[in-house]
Amino acid sequence: MYAEVFAPGTHGGNDRATCSICHTEWPEELEEVEGDRVGPLCRSFREDLGKRLPSAEYLVLGIGAPSAAVDPR
Ligand SMILES: [Zn+2]
């Protein structure tokens, strides 16, 4: 998956639809929050994973189809 992870993304020229974090261009313009335009994927990392990770006891990484987060407790 090297190319999928590290290859430069395309830039169609619409800065208002481009995520400030990962530079993915989305089909619609993104809402600006605190000076950044953040796409739905990066926003989900920040709002879901980013809040849970600091207090997590462990982290499991894998490759698979997207699924809902599961809390083992
Ligand atoms: Zn992004």
Image (spheres, rainbow, N blue to C red):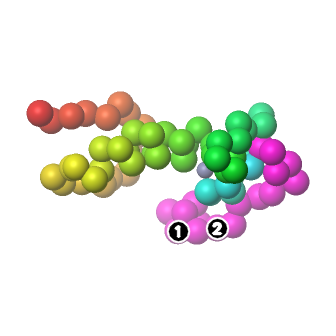
> Residue furthest toward the right?
13
With 55 as the anchor, is 46 left or right in this view? Answer: right
Q: As displayed, is residue 48 above or below residue 50?
A: above
Residue indicated by mark 2: 7
Residue 21 place in picture, x, y as percent? 61, 57
Residue 19 place in picture, x, y as percent? 68, 50
Judging from the image, what secondary structure is the residue with disc 2 in? loop
**3 or 33, which lies in front?**
33
Q: As displayed, is residue 3 above or below residue 28?
A: below
Residue 38 place in picture, x, y as percent? 63, 46
Quadrant of the rendered structure where residue 13 is?
A: bottom right
Q: Find the distance from the CA under tag 2 to the CA under tag 1.
A: 7 Å
> Residue furthest toward the left?
73
Q: Earlier in the sequence, mark 2 or mark 1?
A: 1
Discs 2, 1 touching: Cβ within 8 Å: yes
**Residue 11 can be seen, yes or no:** yes
Residue indicated by mark 1: 2
Q: Which residues are magenta?
A: 1-17
